[in-house]
Amino acid sequence: MTKSIKPLIQHTDVVLMGAGIMSATLGIILKELDPTITIQIFERADEAGTESSDAWNNAGTGHAAYCELNYTPQKPDGSIDTSKATKIAESFEVSKEFWSYLVEKKYVPKPAEFITAIPHVSFVWGDTNVDYLRKRFAALKGNPMFDGMLFTEDRDQIDQWAPIVMKGRDTKQPLAATRMALGTDVNFGTLTRSLMSQLAKMPGVTVHYNIEALDLDPDGNGGWDVFIRNLLSEEKDQVNTKFVFIGAGGATLHLLKRAEINERKGYGGFPVSGLWLKCLNDDIIKQHQAKVYGKASVGSPPMSVPHVDTRIIDGRKELLFGPFAGFTTKFLKNGSMMDLPKSIRFDNAIPMIFAGMKNMPLTKYLIDQVRQTPEQRLEALKEYVPMAELKDWELKEAGQRVQVIKKDKKEGGVLEFGTEVVVAEDGTVAALLGASPGASTAAAVMMGLLSKCFKKQFHTEAWQSKLKEMAPSLNIALSKDEASLEATRKRTSSILGLGEG
Ligand SMILES: Cc1cc2nc3c(=O)[nH]c(=O)nc-3n(C[C@H](O)[C@H](O)[C@H](O)COP(=O)(O)OP(=O)(O)OC[C@H]3O[C@@H](n4cnc5c(N)ncnc54)[C@H](O)[C@@H]3O)c2cc1C
């Protein structure tokens, strides 16, 4: 037997691999739906939420598509596609409802410890981008999800919204901005750790730290044997379960490849590292009160859209700029350089080669980003904060993202930038791949899993009414139901302390 602090449970209904925001969210949802369900959680680190979910490792943006321009692409005919933005905005309302439920249940600390109202601003310069933002605003205007969005081309107005972005700016530059007061900053790390400690207190749940999940094999009875290693003692062991969720962040791909399910085939991963510039000057930090998202420069991937972000981390106001992307072969921040080479297998080699060939400009972009000097990074920052000086900013490592590479009949292989849930046909294994919009939509994504993985229970009156209690708008298109949207925003803003809503 292992020397893990808590004894292993030989059989549980559920095994969650990894203790990030996804496993934490799924664990709580399952426990609320069925208090008798037994769950065992394995985390390789000595604490929950230390990889992508930690506040310093992600941007903490409550992604609701208010300011992220990559969610509203321009179509070849010049019009703006708002479908993805609408879906993300609706999913974020589900998150706020779920978090409100957690607050009311006292499963999480005061909401101010994990969520803060911070206006979301989109800011662009140059005629083409100004024209794009004008069109985007017009396209979103009648959509209730974006009610309250303001648009301006007036420099004084932008100066009020984001003074550090305007100070010292070229006066001849055409500018435009939109602002949503309803935006948020979320500390997903605090939220994850609170949920994990709540789970640890619940009967039938065991959370193990310093234990790495290694493999999973069918047990011959419709369930799974899960193989683990105690990282303190190096001893190996195994447990049995009916259902496995692989929520290992960047390392999910490795574990998915080990699960003997057809659905794993053809998936590969492309790791992208990140760096922030963190502001050290309190005067500058104080002057900024927004998340200001720009437009990705031509050729750069959507996840590297620069933004100047007010953050609230552990009660302190911070200011981050970035992320600068970079090429790495690690799948986790605390991973191994062998992660990428080890992930290449017979079934995904072809999609990976095709995706690699088609994305040479991306690879070049990432390598160029890694090679940037501090002065070059300062130049990028000055596009957003013209008066920035190197002495006021330090470099800080962000989390790892592993973008999904998928087999594609036409293209051979494609690189995706979204979040992908892979579920075995019989629903006994599910895995979460990809990064964006990530943590912000964890509640909707994990609730979405249930119909495939807990088919029998999902349609019961008991589960349906509990789901309605946790997330009243889960199956409602809020963008088409203004009254429900208004009601839910009013309620969640009040519970989460986000002001008027
Ligand atoms: C630079 C950057 C910026 C981002 N910005 C945002 C943002 O603004 N808003 C947003 O909503 N999302 C953002 N995201 C995405 C978001 O951080 C992720 O979608 C989310 O944190 C993923 O949660 P997770 O639980 O899947 O993974 P993680 O938080 O990475 O957790 C996975 C856990 O699994 C553990 N683990 C790994 N392998 C094993 C194993 N074999 N056995 C046991 N445990 C294992 C890890 O130690 C880790 O604790 C960003 C991500 C990055 C990298």
Image: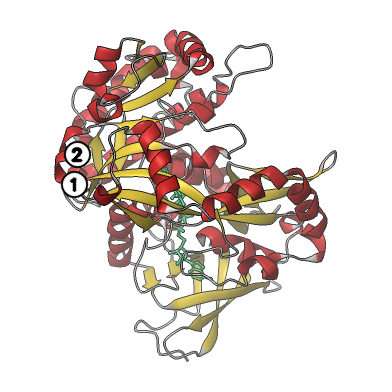
Residue 76: quadrant of the picture: top right
Local crowd size for mark 2, using a 10 Å CA cut-off: few (<14), some (14–19), many (≥20): some
Q: Is residue 121 left or right of residue 326?
A: left
Check if mark 2's residue and mark 1's residue have beta carbons within 8 Å.
yes
Q: Secondary structure at mark 2?
A: helix
Across and down, in percent, residue 320 comes to: 32, 45
The number of numbered badges drawn on the structure is 2
Across and down, in percent, residue 426 comes to: 69, 55
Q: Is residue 72 left or right of residue 486?
A: right
Q: Nearer the viewer, residue 3 or 50?
A: 50
**From mark 2 to mark 1, how far is it between C-alphas?**
6 Å
Residue drawn at the location 24% of the way across and 13% of the way down: 156
The amino acid pointed to by label 2 is: Ile
Residue drawn at the location 50% of the way across and 25% of the way down: 85
The residue to which callout 1 is attached is 281
Q: Secondary structure at mark 1?
A: loop
Q: Is residue 247 visible?
A: no
The amino acid pointed to by label 1 is: Asn
Across and down, in percent, residue 176 comes to: 39, 15
Q: Is residue 29 left or right of residue 344?
A: left
Across and down, in percent, residue 68 comes to: 45, 30
Local crowd size for mark 1, using a 10 Å CA cut-off: few (<14), some (14–19), many (≥20): few
- Up the image or down, 492 lies above or below 344; here it is above
- Up the image or down, 146 lies above or below 464; here it is above
Callout 2: CB less than 8 Å from ligand 1: no
Q: Nearer the viewer, residue 247 or 385?
A: 385
The residue to which callout 2 is attached is 284
- Residue 120 numbered mark, or none: none
Residue drawn at the location 44% of the way across and 91% of the way down: 233
Residue drawn at the location 40% of the way across and 90% of the way down: 3
